[in-house]
Image (cartoon, rainbow, N blue to C red):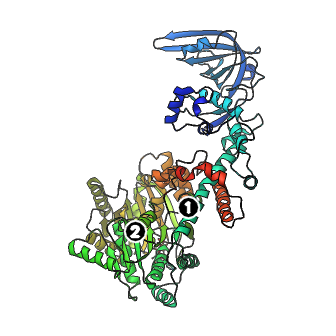
Amino acid sequence: MFDLMGPVQFVKGVGPQRAEALAKAGVRTVEDLLHHLPLRYEDRRQFARIADLRSGMKIAVAGTIAVAGLRRARRMSLYEIRLDDGAGRLKALWFNQPFLKDSLQRGRRVVLFGAVERDAHGGAGLMMASPQWELVEDEDTPGVHTGRIVPVYERLGPLSGKHLRRILSLLARDVPADLDDPMPPDLRARLSVVGRGEALRRLHLPGPDEDVALLNAARGAAHRRLILEELFLFQLGLALRRRGVRQRRKGIAFEVTDRARDAVKRILPFHLTAAQKRVLRQIAEDMKSPHPMNRLVQGDVGSGKTMVALLSMVIAVENGHQAAFMAPTEILAEQHFLTFRRLLSRCPYRVELLSAALKGKEKVEALARVDSGEAQIVVGTHALIQEGVRFRRLGLAVVDEQHRFGVLQREDLIRKGYDADVLVMTATPIPRTLALTAYGDLDVSVVDERPPGRRPVTTRQRRASERRAVLDLVRGEAAAGRQAYVVYPLVAESEKLEDVRAATEMAEEWRAALPGTRVGLLHGRMKSAEKEKVMADFSSGGIQVLVATTVIEVGVDVPNATVMVVEHAERFGLAQLHQLRGRVGRGAHPSTCVLLCHGRLSDDARARVEVMVSTEDGFAIAERDLEIRGPGDFFGTRQWGLPGLRASNLVRDRDLLEQARVEAFRSVEEMESGAAAPLKAFLAEGGWERRFGLAEVG
Ligand code: ADP
Ligand code: MG
């Protein structure tokens, strides 16, 4: 009987030794092996006549070996044959595979597959170098390596691609079409996918009528089934975890009172945009509910998320709870602290900044105020939750991930015993599909509108040789009373001395190039007070051109700034470039972003610059970023690499992810209402908790 869970050792062609090596590559069972998907497929269905071959074709030919010979020269060996198909002869050769003489002997019938090229030594003749080959008795019978649509595999431990093809073609033949399928038939129908047996078979043994292009796009029936199964399982895990969290953990049921409404009105210096109102309503609903809130607020730079967060904190405080606001860096924490204090000046709330700079008595007192509950809104970095800070009644934790899209703090909160609501804000316009994956058990709100008065920003690429034009632009804007940023890239946030020196030199250069213009410098090695002074001078217009390292890339708001010059734009990622550009276009005057590129650009760098020049839409940029970088890299940490995904690719399979999610969440709802056949088989088999690392949360 065919046993999917049987040890791989007993698969024909494997055996104990190879099984051991395969185990190291993570392949233990028959199922594991069947999930080693082909890298791609090659169309080797057609045999060409040798007489019809042209240089550049990639094709299969069949014939009899008319001549064969092994030559050795120095440390090389060359095995050469002439294949005769009755209408012509083709030369084929292999380097350093002397053992071929035992298989490819004169008189044997063989099929070759490879690229046809001009024979450098044979005049007008053609040849194939190192083609794939297969001995056949009769080429009408499709073989393993030729005569069909052939899957191409990546090496797996001790097994070469070709070896794998042989093993898997035999194994796949044994997979029964009616193999046990954990997907209930109605779900299968809704997703319109084939059964598991059929999928596994066709994946490795595509029939002669399959569409090779579809196979290579992973959109053939076999791929669709495996991908949807996997993504469905993953989303089901997320949905269940979400339900579990909601059931097990009790949250705070805040009240949105008239007092809170009044407070909000008093604070607001402007009307909220429709998007801000909508998101605030969603947050308020979450806060009122007795379930803990887990909400992600996405919104482009400057879309007004901070204001929404502040108003949510007001609700918590008006309910007698504390609110924590966690920024990604010390500078940002400071900036937010100042903003909050200014906006809350007409409210009696105590806003506390827990900065790393606090020392001794100051620090002890601040911590005591948090502990006693006297500090109602506490601003700090992400360290707030991790270190020895104790809150009296933490009701709401806002995590501002800015563009760094870090690791969720929720688990930390739970571990500390807080039942606080959690609001994660991200300025990274994460493509929706990825948000669904990484933050799949969060509710997502999108602030998809900008406050009024924003103007489009013109983006230009300039080469270092065009510096004059850039200087002219900055000089002109400064003369017209406007201001400019010049940003210089740094390797890390902890700036090294040589980086600081480079930035300092850059400021000197700009000073020299723009006599009579007030040029300031800001970098991460400066003391807090110095930084604040420079920022204040820039805000007030005292400094006209601010040369800065990337520490300023977020959180600065100077509407009079109309030029953003990014030096070495080729070194910045798309998210960063987008953030930087968001610093201008905030006032009444038209703005320009100049991407100054140095040296030869890599393909990726060129693609990034092109994206920036072509669009200002943060989501479009994020989608392209994802395509250029791939999802693992996008998230920065291995943690988001999702090792559990074997068949799917989050970039390629975005459309299927959406489908899988809808079905998964629907299934969980149906399970809750008792309407659905529970997906027992599916869940039992999946081991989803382990596989996707979803086990211990909640
Ligand atoms: P984000 O946090 O999404 O980057 P902010 O909340 O910092 O955006 O808002 C960016 C700027 O826009 C701030 O100066 C803020 O005061 C202003 N702003 C926010 N909401 C509005 C609004 N509804 N109308 C006018 N200006 C707004
Ligand atoms: Mg902000």
Whether the residue under disc 1 has CB within 8 Å of ligand 1:
no
Local crowd size for mark 2, using a 10 Å CA cut-off: few (<14), some (14–19), many (≥20): many
Query: Compared to 510, does 306 lie above or below?
Result: below
Q: Give the secondary structure at mark 2.
A: strand
The foreground one among 684 and 654 is: 684
- Which residue lies at the image location 54% right of the left edge and 49% below the top edge? 691
Q: Nearer the viewer, mark 1 or mark 2?
A: 1
Residue 594 can be seen in this image: yes
Number of dots carrying numbers: 2
Q: Earlier in the sequence, mark 1 or mark 2?
A: 1
Asked whether, in this view, residue 692 is left or right of residue 226, the answer is left
- Which residue lies at the image location 67% right of the left edge and 30% below the top edge? 169
Q: CA distance from mark 1 to mark 2?
A: 27 Å
Work out which quarter of the rendered image holds the N terminus and state it. top right
Tag of residue 327: 2
Please tell me in which quadrant of the rendered image residue 506 appears: bottom left
Rendering coords of residue 695 (x, y %): 51, 56
Tag of residue 241: 1
Asked whether, in this view, residue 87 is left or right of residue 96, the answer is right
